Image (cartoon, rainbow, N blue to C red):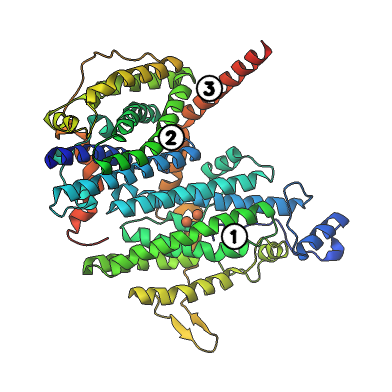
Amino acid sequence: MNDARFECLLRLGDNALVLAQRLCAWIGHGPVMEEDMAQANVALDLIGQARLWLAYAGELEGRGRDEDALAYGRDAGAFRNVLLVEQPNGDYAQTIARQFLFDAWHHAELSALTASSDARIAAIAAKALKEVSYHLERSSDWMLRLGDGTAESHARLQAALERLWMYSGELFDADAHDATLVEQGIVPAPQSLRAGWLQQVGAVCTAATLTMPDADAWMQHGGRQGRHSEHLGYLLAEMQFLPRAYPGVQW
Amino acid sequence: MYAQMVDTGASRLRSREEMDADEQAFQARIDDGQKIEAQDWMPEGYRRTLVRQISQHAHSEIVGMLPEGNWITRAPSLKRKAILLAKVQDEAGHGLYLYSAAETLGVSREQLVDDLHTGRAKYSSIFNYPTLTWADIGAIGWLVDGAAIMNQIPLCRCSYGPYSRAMVRVCKEESFHQRQGYDLLLALCRGSEEQKAMAQDALERWWWPALMMFGPPDADSVHSAQSQAWKIKLLSNDELRQKFVDQTVPQAEYLGLRVPDADLRWNTERGHYDFGAIDWSEFHAVLKGNGPCNRERLQARREAWAEGEWVRAAALAYADKHAAAERHSQAA
Ligand SMILES: [Fe+2]
Ligand SMILES: [Fe+2]
């Protein structure tokens, strides 16, 4: 039914949108100009994906909300992104670790979605998958460079990994919406992606001389149901301020 | 312009007879419209002037990312956010081509960046003004990228090959930026009263600084004459400024915005707009470091560089380790 699909599209769209918004803050402030360009590339891909997911969500909902109404008109509690992507940029190690943990999941998720029984979801996923293959390659590369770079970069990345780890479990959570959609062949069962994800993250950590945190560690949950960290409210306040200050106009 | 008031080191323009044989041959090639390439012989003054000019231009692209970057996280629609992000990314690309063009002249990017951070090198005065509203993003695209194009189109024909080729690439993207900026303002001007007022306010704040981008009148300047002889400057500052005013005033009228200059009027005799006197004391104050945002801009660049130090060190260490491992496995 449409409610579950609407939820699922918001989850996909909000993950991309919130992470893109975080990356936007790096532009002009990165460690080297080539990285400003690369971060902008990833952010542009994610904004493009968010627009496709949210536009489809709005159409399914049938209440006249377009991509911008959904992006700019919802309060934090109506956002469905995972907690991981709303975590602050921190230092470059934290930005890279967040990106890598997300990319590895995102890539697996999109790969599975290319076989979705919803043709439009399958088509968007196929387009996004090409982009995310590059994101994963790039974030894996940076995991290696920082993990196996200097003592300082290693320590920073290890700390970032440990700090963000508790937000990784939510990627594999399933609720009633997921159950409905799995049954209809629209989305993969979240849990089915976990073993592959752990293996991939483990392999990159090993190559990067990092210690992967305990897979069974205590995890945070709730982003996909709209219970967020304190960070999201500020992120949205910044992102949404213009349409809220001047409601009802075109830009 | 993006390179304002470039010192050529010349105290006067020398005649052909005063040049040695190498210099004469060099000037003859330039007069003949040939391109000078990195490996060619060139007078030291030519090389040094180009390094100054190209690096000022490169620094301007990079510092210029800051006032616009200021609004990426606050763009009012996803489409506008993507357009602005892509534009700022283009500017980073321009900075990179230009640093590469400068490197062909025997300086390193590190040196040039260091000159920027220590305040030895200049960048365009325009980027020391704040972006206070969303309309400023439109005004920058329309006026600042517009002024940049005015200056850079002739530079596509400049005598130094790597610079002229960089300019060809850059100009294509700048004209997109200008159209996008204008389109942003058009949406505001066709919008609510508040949006239109926002656009008018932006024009009022950016108009005079945009005219200053071309630099002070330089018709009698030795540096300008030398640069023109070397064909690394093709039109005088005032000629460029006049072209810019002539092009821009009708565009402002189309938007329904008022240019903040009581002396602005069409001069039928000249076939150009007459315009009011520019406050050059403001220009010199900004160039000296006393514009509204000079300190913030430079501090943001310095901080990005300092905080990125460990990241660059890690990338280098990793590359070295792996190059060593490669050599080792080849030897084995
Ligand atoms: Fe540019
Ligand atoms: Fe531009």
Farthest residue toward the bottom?
Answer: B269
Can residue B294 be seen here? The reply is no
Q: Chain of mark 3?
A: B
- The residue wearing badge 3 is B318
Label 3 crowding class (10 Å Cα cut-off): few <14, some 14-19, many 20+?
Answer: some
Q: Position of residue A115 (x, y in %)?
A: 30, 34
Q: Are marks 2 and 1 in contact (CB under 8 Å)?
A: no
Q: Residue at x 35, y 60 (%)?
A: B136
> Which mark identifies residue A134?
2
Q: Are marks 2 and 3 in contact (CB under 8 Å)?
A: no
User: Where the N terminus of chain B falls, by quadrant?
Assistant: bottom right
- The residue wearing badge 1 is B5
Structural distance between the alpha carbons of marks 3 and 1? 42 Å
Between B227 and A10, the one lying in front of the other is A10
The type of residue carrying mark 1 is: Met
Q: Residue at x 49, y 47 (%)?
A: B92
Label 1 crowding class (10 Å Cα cut-off): few <14, some 14-19, many 20+?
Answer: some
Q: Position of residue B84 (x, y in %)?
A: 38, 52
Q: Position of residue A210 (x, y in %)?
A: 40, 15
Q: Chain of mark 2?
A: A
The type of residue carrying mark 2 is: Tyr
SS for callout 2: helix
Q: Chain of mark 1?
A: B
* Beta carbon of the mark 2 residue lies under 8 A of ligand 1: no
Q: Nearer the viewer, mark 2 or mark 3?
A: 2
Structural distance between the alpha carbons of marks 2 and 1? 43 Å
Structural distance between the alpha carbons of marks 2 and 3? 21 Å
